[in-house]
Amino acid sequence: MPGDEHKKTTKNLIKLGKSLGFRIYSADEVDEPTIQLPKTIDTSILSSADQIDVIWFNEYNFPKYAFEIELSTGVDRGVQRLYQLRHYQDCKLFVVIPKAGSNATAYRNRYDKLIESDPYYTISERFSIINEVDVEKLLNEALRFDKLKYKLLEWDLNEDILKIVSEVTEEEIEEVPSWVSEGKANWSRHFTLQRKHAKDLIYKLAEEIKSKSTGIEIRLLKWHISLYKSGSMIAVIYPRKDKLVLLIKNIEDHYNDYNLETTEKPDTDYIIKSATKYVLVKTEGDVEKVSNLLQIASG
């Protein structure tokens, strides 16, 4: 169905833009989070700019790439809407057409005539045409690279892209361990793209916590694993491919006693404000040491 293909291509363009670091506006609701149209686009003058299918904005909210998806209704209106963005001189304008079929040939011929006509010829070098299959290919390549960065380099991905590259199929979803008290839906995302070593460490840490009867609860939150005692958070765990990275509350004076590797916490991590350093857990021996620190932190 044409409507389904339009929706699919819109969603692909949204994901591709996010992967490339842009802020995305879409005129269509496609079950993929986007931004409101920024005030840098004055809709009192550009009256139909908010109807453009997809616009990629830079960090200053200026449009860099705009897309009109024309798979079944012709290219005229799409070109007209894109032309409204002509004053944003760094903005590239794309018309997305079908790859094959009678529409593909007709739309390309009509597009070529339009771009040579008044007023569009004045910015013809900023217009381009692309087909929906190439959009999907671009997306797949971008996400493949994102997955490799995340898996092999522990690259920090923005939240939207982390959601996309961490998606798992039904076959990959693992049973949540019984010692996890909350957040069962997030277990697979924490570990399917991580190496086995990190999972082994978290299991070992859970065993240590249980064996010492500390009363500490393990909860899975959106992007991390948290440890709670009597309803209060005492630590945060970030699983990485070959280690666990912990923030622990109010015990940095004890770090030297356990000879654990630490690294400075950036100002952007404010989950546990009293902690200024991350503790790195790389071996089973480190697990036992950090479990002792957690006992101290839990009082």
Image (cartoon, rainbow, N blue to C red):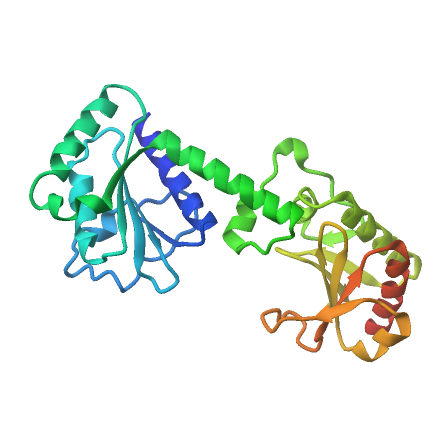
Of all residues, the one furthest to the front in this rendering is 125
| Residue 6 image point, x, y percent | 32, 34
Foreground: 239 or 231? Answer: 239
Residue 299 appears in the rendering = no
Q: Residue drawn at (65%, 46%), measured in percent from left and top? A: 151
Identify the image quadrant of the C terminus.
bottom right
Task: Point out residue 176 in the picture as x, y percentages from the top left corner.
Answer: 74, 44
Farthest top residue in view: 102
Report the side of 108 relative to 116 (left or right).
right
Quadrant in which the N terminus appears: top left
* Total numbered labels placed on residues in the image: 0
At which x and y percent is residue 63?
30, 56
Q: From this viewpoint, which residue is outermost toward the left?
A: 118
Q: Residue placed farthest to the right in the image?
A: 211
Q: Is residue 195 left or right of residue 62?
A: right
Q: Position of residue 259 (x, y in %)?
A: 88, 70
* Nearer to me, 238 or 152: 152
Q: Is residue 48 visible?
A: yes
Nearest to the observer: residue 63 or residue 28: 63
Q: Residue at x 16, y 33 (%)?
A: 112
The vertical placement of 20 against 274, above or below, is: above
Give the residue at x 24% y 48%: 51
Horizontal relation, residue 150 to residue 200: left or right: left
Q: Residue at x 19, y 59 (%)?
A: 43
